[in-house]
Amino acid sequence: MAIRQIRLDGDEILTKKCRVVKEITPRQEELINDMIETMYDADGVGLAAPQVGVLRRIAVIDVGEGPIVLVNPEVIEADGEQTGQEGCLSVPGKVGIVTRPNHVKVKAYNEKMEEFEIEGEELLARALVHEIDHLDGHVYTEIVEGDLMDVTYENPEEGEEEVNASLSDDKQ
Ligand code: ZN
C-alpha cells in the first residue's frame, strides 16, 4: 500500500468522465488499497479514483463506519434535500455550501465485483453523490452556493489562544 498524490481542483483530470471497470485486476486492487490509505492519511470521508489520477469508476468512502469500496456506482434513487457544508480533498482547506439529496440508494460493485446496494442519509448520502460526481468529471465547486470558505478547526486549545490574543490586543 502507498499514499498517492491527490490532484487539486484545476487539474484537468478532475473534469474527465471515468471509464467503467470490467474486472478487478491486481493493479486495481492495489489502487483501491492505496485510495483507502490515501483517504485516511488526508483525513477525508471519501476519495474517487480521478483524484489520484486514474480515470476509472472507483471510489472509497468512510463516514466513520469503516471503508466502503464502490466500483461502477450508480445512483438508483434520490429524494429529499439537504443544504450544508461540503469539502473535498482536491480543494484543501476550503468548504462550501452545497445542496444535495438527503437520501440516496446506490447500486455498485465491491472490490470482488459482487453487486450490492447501499442506502445513505445525510452525510453518507452527501458523500455518495459527491464521489459519484467525481467519476463524471464534476467537482463540488461547480455547484457551490456562494463563496468557498476557509475551514475553521474546532480545537478548544486553539480557540483559547485566539481569545487570549484578542484580549492582549485590547490592552494595547
Ligand atoms: Zn471530492
Image (cartoon, grey):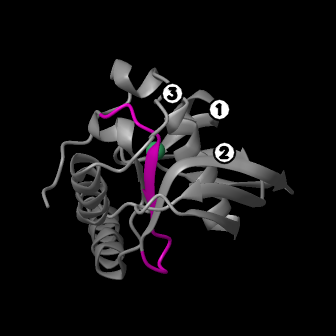
Earlier in the chain: of badge 1 and badge 3, it is 3
Note whether ligand 1 is within 8 Å of mark 2. no
Q: Amino acid at mark 2?
A: Val
Residue 91 location, quadrant = top left
Categorize mark 1 by other alpha carbons within 10 Å: few (<14), some (14-19), many (20+).
few
**Horizontal and vertical percent position of residue 49:** 37, 42
Mark 3 residue type: Gly
Note whether ligand 1 is within 8 Å of mark 3.
Answer: no
**SS type, badge 2:** strand
Magenta stretch, overall SS: loop
Can residue 121 be seen by looking at this rendering?
no
**Magenta stretch?**
54-66
**Which numbered disc flags the more N-terminal residue, 3 or 2?**
2
Whether residue 57 appears in magenta in the rendering, the answer is: yes
Q: Are marks 3 and 2 in contact (CB under 8 Å)?
A: no
Q: Determine whether the residue tagged by mark 3 lies in a helix, strand or loop.
A: loop
Q: CA distance from mark 3 to mark 2?
A: 17 Å
Which label is found at residue 137? 3
Percent position of residue 103, x then y: 78, 62
Quadrant for residue 11, please give it: top left
**Which quarter shows the N terminus?**
bottom left
Q: Residues within 10 Å of mark 3 (few under 14, many from 20)?
A: some
Mark 2 closeness class: few <14, some 14–19, many ≥20 residues within 10 Å: some
Q: Is residue 144 left or right of residue 10?
A: right
Q: Which mark is residue 98?
A: 2
